[in-house]
Amino acid sequence: MPKKVFVSGCFDMLHSGHVAFFEEAATHGDLYVGIGSDRTINDLKGRRTVNGERERLYMIQSLRFVKDARINSGSGLIDFEEELREIRPDIFFVNEDGYTPDKKRLCDEMGIELVVSRRVPVAGLPPRSTTALRSECRIPYRLDLAGGWLDQPYVSKFWPGAVLTISIEPDLEFNDRSGMSSSTRKKAVELWHTDIPEGDPHLLARTLFCLENPPGTTYVSGSQDAIGIVFPGLNRLDYAVGEYWPEKITTVNDPEVLDWLEQRLWFITLPPRVGGFNVLDETNISVEGARALADAADRVWSSILARDIEGLGRWYRASFEAQVAMFPLMKSRVVAETIRHYRDKALGWKLAGAGGGGYLALVSDRPVENAIRIRIRRERTA
């Protein structure tokens, strides 16, 4: 009797990459496909589907590699749990960027083998992904590399310091509520549609910051989001005491530095933070905490410029620890469990944003299995 193989995903804008994925999965046995509902995709991606769930179900059921398909009944990143328990597959087959620690735990609990695809395109066909098909929009995401929270006056009033950001190419459609500045990016798309225009980046970033935070805004998003999206490369934003906007922005576009850094960053997907989560519900902001955060950011900056991987790992980790000391809710149970899993595989770790979920970014000079790679956006050349 052939083994049962299960895959799950959005499969919006069905393309040859999806079909190749199904074909590869079907080499392991009879293929069952779980399809993310329209509601789930809207919750995770913050957008409507191009093809509705019934249309996606019809197309996937019609493929010769697929034995059966159904719409997943759950929500979130583990929307397929009920289907998994009903089908009881021998193998759960995932793409490299579809691997998460929660999926691994669920498979271990149920005695299912988790197999990771490497996305090899069919010979003679170009590599395809839904993100690439949607990538007429080249507006980047932003990673808070170190010092995050010092762009908020209620933190920097205790001690000033720097926030370090990198601008990330939109090769992957990062989930909403996951610390990659997706809400600010949506404002940038609303403002500029497909790409950041030519012009003074200081003025462009201020324009984006003001659009996201109009007069009367109750919670002001930190300016590192707008700056980190607009300014290419690696950026150091120096905030004075109690200020929303940095007094100085230092940008590094040296290709050797950026190459070195992006080759040592590895992303692990976590569930997005849940609706209603507020990291400010429990805080312990102090002079000592803000100073430790500022000091860690300084040392991360120095380590990157010196290309000191040991120093980067140590102080990257220290930056996260300083954040958690002031904002304990950043480190949820899932975050803590994921850190324990990767503790021996990385030199440092930090959440991509304000916590509660999203992406855990690891520092390692060796490949991290099942991790996502990113590309730092480079400065445009004439």
Image (tube, rainbow, N blue to C red):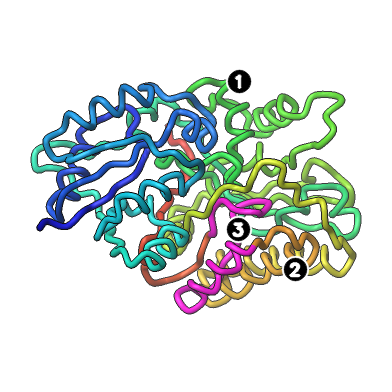
246 or 382: nearer the viewer: 246
- Label 2, residues with CA under 10 Å away: few <14, some 14-19, many ≥20: some
Residue 191: image tag: 1
Q: Which residue is mark 2?
A: 295
> Dot 3 lies on which element?
strand
Marks 1/2: CA–CA distance: 35 Å
133 or 177: nearer the viewer: 177
Indicate the position of residue 379 as horizontal and vertical percent values. Answer: 49, 40
Marks 3/2: CA–CA distance: 18 Å
Which is more N-terminal, label 2 or label 1? 1
Indicate the position of residue 11 as horizontal and vertical percent values. Answer: 32, 34
Q: Are marks 1 and 3 in contact (CB under 8 Å)?
A: no
- Indicate whether 231 appears above or below 114: above
For discs 1 and 3, the disc positioned in front in the rendered view: 3
> Dot 1 lies on which element?
helix
**Residue 324 within the magenta-colored segment of the rendering:** no
Q: Which residue is mark 3?
A: 351
Indicate the position of residue 124 as horizontal and vertical percent values. Answer: 9, 38
The residue range painted magenta reads 333-360
Quadrant of the rendered image containing residue 294: bottom right
- Left or right: residue 323 versus residue 345 is right
Which is more N-terminal, label 2 or label 3? 2
Quadrant of image for the N terminus = bottom left
For discs 1 and 2, the disc positioned in front in the rendered view: 1
Instruction: Give the amino acid type for the residue marked by disc 3 in the picture.
Output: Leu
- Indicate whether 29 appears above or below 378: below
- Label 3, residues with CA under 10 Å away: few <14, some 14-19, many ≥20: many
Instruction: Give the amino acid type for the residue marked by disc 2 in the picture.
Output: Asp
- Left or right: residue 76 versus residue 36 is right
Residue 307: image tag: none
Residue at image point 52% right, 38% down: 44
